Image (cartoon, rainbow, N blue to C red):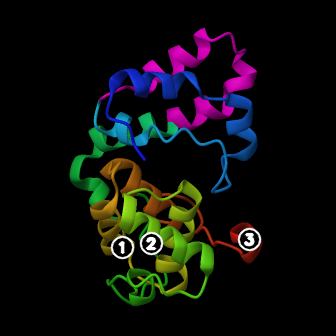
Amino acid sequence: MFETSIAEIIRQVDRIQPTEYARTRNFTRGAVTRLSPYISRGVISTKFVLDRVAASGHQPFQIQKLIQELAWRDYFQRVWQAKGNGIDDDLKHGQTDVENTQMPKALIDAATGIEAVDDGIECLYETGYVHNHLRLYISSIACNIAKSHWRTPARWMHFHLLDADWASNALSWQWTAGAFSHKRYFASHENIN
């Protein structure tokens, strides 16, 4: 599923279709890059990806969404550099409506009854990969439905991720839980479908 040859990784960067990425990245079968493991491990950088895609002749407006997503990854890294272990705690606001500090069993067992979510968790266990929006849905279920504090579920996911990047993971979970944003994110039936 994930190449280990640097030549193939570079070809993967060169195959990015920025307009398709922008249009379909929210869908599990969308034109996602699958470059996160290489970026998180320092094989390639976000700047390398940006420079390579920009050099392919795309105008900035055509690659805007890709630029934004690369910038988010860098932003999370800078927050981690500035806050250090502070990202292990609620960063901006205390998470509200918390009833436990556990990982919900239905998520661990991939038995939520929501087919897309359960399939995403099975994929995570089998491959170390789960689509970004499924990460959001899983964290929304854990934090905002099961009312778990974000930290333990975030560690559970981080343990299983091939692209395990603590900054992106912890801060994304905090964003979903409302600890790193002004509101919580709730996955809706429509979004999941």
Q: Position of residue 114 (x, y in %)?
A: 61, 82
Q: Secondary structure under badge 1?
A: helix
CA gap, disc 3 and disc 2: 18 Å
CA gap, disc 1 and disc 3: 23 Å
Q: Is residue 140 visible?
A: no
Disc 2 marks a residue whose amino acid type is Glu
Name the N-terminal-most of marks 3 and 2.
2
Disc 3 marks a residue whose amino acid type is Asn
Question: Which residues fall within the magenta stretch?
Answer: 43-71
CA gap, disc 1 and disc 2: 16 Å
Reading the image, the residue beneath label 3 is 193
Disc 1 marks a residue whose amino acid type is Pro
Reading the image, the residue beneath label 2 is 122
Compared with residue 165, is residue 185 higher up or lower down, i.e. above or below?
A: below
Residue for point 37% across, 68% down: 125
Residue 188 vs residue 84: left or right?
right
Q: Position of residue 10 (x, y in %)?
A: 44, 22
Reading the image, the residue beneath label 1 is 153
Nearer to the camera, 11 or 85: 11
Residue for point 47% across, 79% down: 142
Compared with residue 40, is residue 120 higher up or lower down, i.e. above or below?
A: below
* Disc 3 versus disc 2: nearer the observer: 2
* Disc 1 versus disc 2: nearer the observer: 2
Residue for point 44% across, 27% down: 46
Name the N-terminal-most of marks 1 and 2.
2
Quadrant in the rendering for residue 93: bottom left
Q: Position of residue 24 (x, y in %)?
A: 72, 46
Q: Secondary structure under badge 3?
A: loop
Query: Mark 2: few, some, or many residues within 10 Å (few <14, many ≥20)?
Result: some
Marks 3,2: beta carbons within 8 A: no
Residue for point 77% across, 72% down: 190
Marks 1,3: beta carbons within 8 A: no
